[in-house]
């Protein structure tokens, strides 16, 4: 059984869980003897992709899906004339438009990957999202996303598969993180000496509950706690500016800080006393919480979304707080920050066992490869 040539169309390779998942799928196909191509507007992870011996095609940012639907498929088809692509995987609603049209041109099948629930509130956004339901196969990254998709599109039942992202335990292993990496990163991020670090990795394109976390830190009322919101990729987004105003209004300058996207996340987790994921039902999955548990860190999430699925709650590996409730979130943070040394060590062991048994990258790659083979009859 030969491995296929996979084309992934993604909205960005500028870091984050979606970009990481794209590279991992490419690596799995190449390791199985196939070929991998990624079409994206580019980003900081393009060199990492090329080191895998995958190919990259630069495309315009898909901020206008209708324009992309009309013009980009033809251009991509010309670029791929000699590539013999077997299957296409789209990783966002906008790229789904392009993937569907390109698959028709090439006479092959395509996959829509649902990284989050259907969230669009306007008619145009809902229309774009709904196009994903027409894919030959649909991947949901969590049970939460799968339930949401089936509630909206019951006809997906026979084409929907839940494939939870796995992580690379050779990278996310606390025993492999040298102290000098942690010290250097602490200096780069300006983490105050002696503070308890609450770490919240994420993106700032839209409100994913970070303002609730800011309010929770204020309610926590501890001067020894420093909260770092990681994920800025350069020029501040409108929401990032809004978040900065919320920090200032809460009089938390110096205690809550927006930080850049960090490549060395294993070192970042080792700095943290607790790792947080906000967003509630908006969250499709939280790679950060799985990675943090692999590093033996306590985790806290808002309940109701895919992030909550990754935690064993009530202090087993972390805590859940009702979405949108800063008082409850502050209480969960206090519980995590108050752990004794012995209790933290016990939680770390349990968390590592939990994620190693549930979120294996090898297992998720096997599921992906099996799906690619089914769609290409290879």
Image (cartoon, rainbow, N blue to C red):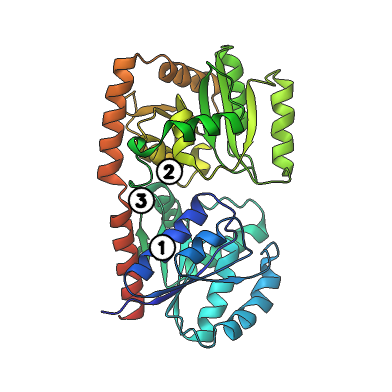
Q: Secondary structure at mark 3?
A: loop
Q: Quick check: 92 above or below 106? A: above
Q: Quick check: 136 above or below 281? A: below
**Label 3 sits on residue:** 166
Q: Distance of mark 2 from mark 3, alpha carbons?
A: 14 Å
Q: Which mark is residue 25?
A: 1
User: Residue 153 is drawn in which quadrant?
Assistant: bottom left
Residue 312: percent from the left, percent from the top? 32, 32
Does any portion of residue 27 appear in the rendered image? yes
User: Residue 308 is drawn in which quadrant?
Assistant: top left
Q: Nearer the viewer, mark 2 or mark 1?
A: 1
Tell which circle, 2 or 3, labels the residue nearer the N-terminal end. Answer: 3
Q: Distance of mark 1 from mark 3, alpha carbons?
A: 11 Å
**Label 2 sits on residue:** 306
Residue 106: percent from the left, percent from the top? 50, 85
Residue 50: percent from the left, percent from the top? 51, 66
Tell which circle, 2 or 1, labels the residue nearer the N-terminal end. Answer: 1
Give the residue at x 37% y 62%.
160
Q: Distance of mark 2 from mark 1, alpha carbons?
A: 20 Å
As rendered, which of 262 and 297 lies closer to the eye? 262
């Amino acid at each position: 059984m030969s491995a296929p040539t996979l084309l992934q169309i993604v909205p960005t390779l500028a870091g984050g869980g979606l970009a990481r998942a794209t590279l991992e799928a490419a690596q799995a196909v190449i390791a199985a003897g196939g070929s991998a191509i990624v079409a994206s507007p580019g980003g900081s992870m393009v060199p990492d992709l090329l080191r895998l011996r995958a190919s990259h095609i630069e495309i315009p940012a898909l901020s206008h899906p209708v324009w992309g639907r009309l013009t980009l498929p033809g251009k991509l088809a010309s670029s791929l004339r000699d590539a013999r692509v077997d299957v296409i995987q789209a990783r966002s609603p906008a790229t789904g438009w392009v993937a569907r049209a390109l698959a028709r041109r090439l006479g092959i099948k395509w996959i829509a990957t649902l990284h989050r629930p259907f969230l669009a509130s306007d008619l145009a956004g809902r229309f774009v999202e709904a196009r994903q339901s027409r894919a030959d196969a649909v991947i949901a990254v969590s049970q939460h996303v799968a339930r949401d998709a089936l509630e909206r599109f019951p006809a997906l039942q026979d084409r929907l598969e839940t494939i939870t992202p796995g992580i690379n335990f050779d990278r996310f292993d606390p025993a492999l993180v040298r102290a000098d990496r942690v010290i250097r990163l602490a200096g780069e991020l300006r983490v105050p000496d002696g503070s308890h670090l609450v770490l919240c990795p994420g993106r700032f394109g839209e409100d994913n509950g970070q303002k609730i976390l800011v309010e929770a830190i204020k309610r926590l009322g501890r001067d020894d706690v420093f909260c770092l919101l990681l994920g800025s990729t350069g020029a501040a987004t409108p929401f990032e500016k809004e978040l900065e105003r919320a920090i200032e209004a809460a009089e938390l300058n110096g205690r809550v800080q927006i930080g850049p996207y960090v490549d060395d996340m294993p070192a970042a987790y080792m700095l943290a006393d607790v790792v947080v994921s906000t967003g509630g039902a908006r969250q499709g999955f939280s790679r950060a919480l799985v990675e943090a548990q692999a590093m033996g860190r306590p985790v806290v999430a808002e309940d109701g979304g895919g992030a909550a699925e990754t935690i064993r709650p009530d202090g087993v590996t972390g805590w859940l707080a009702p979405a949108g409730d800063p008082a409850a979130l502050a209480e969960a943070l206090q519980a995590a920050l108050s752990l004794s040394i012995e209790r933290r060590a016990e939680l770390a062991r349990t968390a590592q066992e939990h994620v190693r048994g549930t979120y294996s990258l090898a297992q998720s790659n096997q599921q992906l490869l099996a799906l690619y083979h089914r769609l290409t009859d290879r």
